[in-house]
Image (spheres, rainbow, N blue to C red):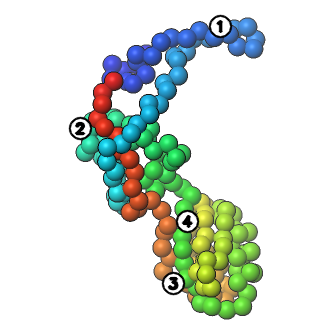
Amino acid sequence: MFSKISRYRALDDVVTTDADGRRLSSRALRVAAVATGQFTHTIADADRLDQLATRYYQQPRNWWRICDANPEILSPQELLGAEPVVTYRCDISPGAGIPNLLRALTEMVGVSRAVLDGEATVVVTFNRLNLTMPDLAATMLAHGFTASAAKQIGRTGKQIVIPPNITG
C-alpha cells in the first residue's frame, strides 16, 4: 500500500517466480528519469535535501528529484557532504619521518587513506564515526609533527543539478 502522493503508487504490479518456484508479487522498478537540470545550486554547510526541495519545488518530499538529477553521487548524505567518511587536509611541520607518520595514520581503525600532498600537507580520509580530527592530530604530535587547523574537503561550495519542477 502506497500513499496517494507516492511516486511508486502508479507503478504496475509484477508477478515473478523465484528459484524455488514460489510466485512473488512486487511493484515494477521505478526507472529514474533522465533529468536535465535547468540550473544548479551551490551547496552550503547547512543545506538539507528536504529544505532544498521545499525551496525549489514547494514540497519537501521531492528531495529524491535532486538525487536522481545527480547520479554520480551515490547517497543523499554524500550529496550534501554529510557522509560518515570524510577527508581532511592538514598542514604539518616539515621533518623526517613522514613515511612513518603516514603508516601510523593508515593503521588507525577508521582511516582508509593518508597521503602526502606537496611537501608538508597531509590528506586523510577517515570514518568520523570511529575517529575525530583531534585523534589524528594527537597521532601526528606523537610522531613529532605539529598540525595546523585541518580543513574538511567536501561538497560545500560545489554545485549540484536542480532539475525542472515537472510533475508526473
Q: CA distance from mark 1 to mark 2?
A: 41 Å
Q: Are marks 4 and 2 in contact (CB under 8 Å)?
A: no
Which quarter of the image is occupied by the N terminus? top left
Question: Vertically, is 118 above or below 71?
Answer: below
Q: Which mark is residue 58?
A: 2
Residue ID at (61%, 77%): 117
The first of marks 3 and 1 along the sequence is 1
Q: Is residue 124 left or right of residue 168?
A: right
Q: Is residue 138 visible?
A: no
What element does badge 2 sit on? loop
Circle 2 residues within 10 Å: few <14, some 14–19, many ≥20: few
Q: Is residue 47 left or right of residue 108?
A: left
Tell me which amino acid carries mark 3: Ser
Residue 61, image x and y in percent?
34, 35
Question: Vertically, is 77 above or below 145?
Answer: above
Residue 68, image x and y in percent?
44, 38
